[in-house]
């Protein structure tokens, strides 16, 4: 198709530090883009022109192609749109961006101008502050109330203190686990990409669960490789995977729990897919829903809640995403999707 004057951005847009793209509202396809947008999206403009909008959108967030196309049509009809969007770069890395769409007419043709800003760091910091605020306002406050109440009962009746002392110890252990989870989130959300290692995924997964096999000798932890895959990861991957596997052990209702870790290639995106399957009761829906609303006025269960945040943010710090499948009565599948890397010349 020949390029029309209405399909091109003015050359001055190349000087901007914000990503700018010109879209056809009827198809929601890129017509032209500046260098900053190419950098953000990870594709050259020539490739972006050939892609449908859902091909560079994260799979596990509510950004369906239908919904996005409606936004472009609304912008073209003089209804400016502003929204957050998690884009998927060509290498599989995911990035949060803020988008503003506005309509304009060029040479008699309706077009939509998109201004795109990278808000990955801001989004991470904002979500972390929201989670810490909730922990302080609910989890920690509730635990301290219990500890204080038990201490008062011991003071009133020192001879009947054994049960209260045990409960105080349990609360103290809960707080310690929670603070360790917060430290893990802090490490995951301040990644050092210079120290990531290029590894075969099945080897990294096996290393991540080695300590759990020693700590839980009655559990059957299996690591399978359906498809050989490689990626570049740091300690955040081991944090995420160990939490997912340990949840599958700790919340099992039968002795000898079974957890299976499967390394595969995502059929839709080609990314590294790590599936963690267990036979536990379903993860509470409220805990999964809270992952994208950390500022809500709900508490976070010690058993899974903070650990789910560790998993999610650790995976996202690596440019990936996480998805949950819950059976009606028993069984969960936690899936990590991570950017793939080319295999080395010699296998690991």
Image (cartoon, helix red, strand yellow):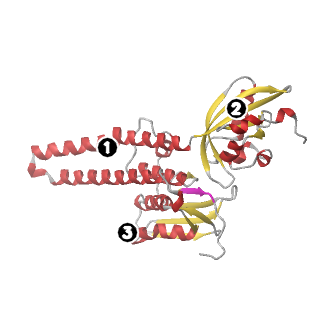
Q: Is residue 338 magenta?
A: yes
Q: Is residue 181 magenta?
A: no
- How packed mark 2 is, by other alpha carbons closer than 10 Å (few <14, some 14-19, many 20 or more), is many
Residue at the extreme right: 2
C-alpha distance separating marks 1 and 3: 27 Å
Name the residue carrying label 2: 71
Mark identifier at residue 215 = 3
- Seen in the picture, residue 12 relative to 52 is either above or below; the reply is above
Secondary structure of residue under mark 2: helix
Direction from residue 67 to residue 98 in the image, left or right: left
* Chain-order first, disc 3 or disc 2: 2
Q: Nearer the viewer, residue 313 or 119?
A: 119
Whole-percent x, y for residue 270 in the image: 68, 59
- Marks 1 & 3, CB-CB < 8 Å contact: no
* Chain-order first, disc 2 or disc 1: 2
Mark identifier at residue 28 = none
User: Residue at 31% of width from left, 53% of height from top?
Assistant: 176
Q: Of tags 3 and 2, which is closer to the observer?
A: 2
Which residues are the magenta region?
333-339
Q: Nearer the viewer, residue 180 or 327?
A: 180
C-alpha distance separating marks 2 and 1: 41 Å
- Marks 2 & 1, CB-CB < 8 Å contact: no
* Chain-order first, disc 1 or disc 3: 1
Q: Quadrant of the N terminus?
A: top right
């Amino acid at each position: 198709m020949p390029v029309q004057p209405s399909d091109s951005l003015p050359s001055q847009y190349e000087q901007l530090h914000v990503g700018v793209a010109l879209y056809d509202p009827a198809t929601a396809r890129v017509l032209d883009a500046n260098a900053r947008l190419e950098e953000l999206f990870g594709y050259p403009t020539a490739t972006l022109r050939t892609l449908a909008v859902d091909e560079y959108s994260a799979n596990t967030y509510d950004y369906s192609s239908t919904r996005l196309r409606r936004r472009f049509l609304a912008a073209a009809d003089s209804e400016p749109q502003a929204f957050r969007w998690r884009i998927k770069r060509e290498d599989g890395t995911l990035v949060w961006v803020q988008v503003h769409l506005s309509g304009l007419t060029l040479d008699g043709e309706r077009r939509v101008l998109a201004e795109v800003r990278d808000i990955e760091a801001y989004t991470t910091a904002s979500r972390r502050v929201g989670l810490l605020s909730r922990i302080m306002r609910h989890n920690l406050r509730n635990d301290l109330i219990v500890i204080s109440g038990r201490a008062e009962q011991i003071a009133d009746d020192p001879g009947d203190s054994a049960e209260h002392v045990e409960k105080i110890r349990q609360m103290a252990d809960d707080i310690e686990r929670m603070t360790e989870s917060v430290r893990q989130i802090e490490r995951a959300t301040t990644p050092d990409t210079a120290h990531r290692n290029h590894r075969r995924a099945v080897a990294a997964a096996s290393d991540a669960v080695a300590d759990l096999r020693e700590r839980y000798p009655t559990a059957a932890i299996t690591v399978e490789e359906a498809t050989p895959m490689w990626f570049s990861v740091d300690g955040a991957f081991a944090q995420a995977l160990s939490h997912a596997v340990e949840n599958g052990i700790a919340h099992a209702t039968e002795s000898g729990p079974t957890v299976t870790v499967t390394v595969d290639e995502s059929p839709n995106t080609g990314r590294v897919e790590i599936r963690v399957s267990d036979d536990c009761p379903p993860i509470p829906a409220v805990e999964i829903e809270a992952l994208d609303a950390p500022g809500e006025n709900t508490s976070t269960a010690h058993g899974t809640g903070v650990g789910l945040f560790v998993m999610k943010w650790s995976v996202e710090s690596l440019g990936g995403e996480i998805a949950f499948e819950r059976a009606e009565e028993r069984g969960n599948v936690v899936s990590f999707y991570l950017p793939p890397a080319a295999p080395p010349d010699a296998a690991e």
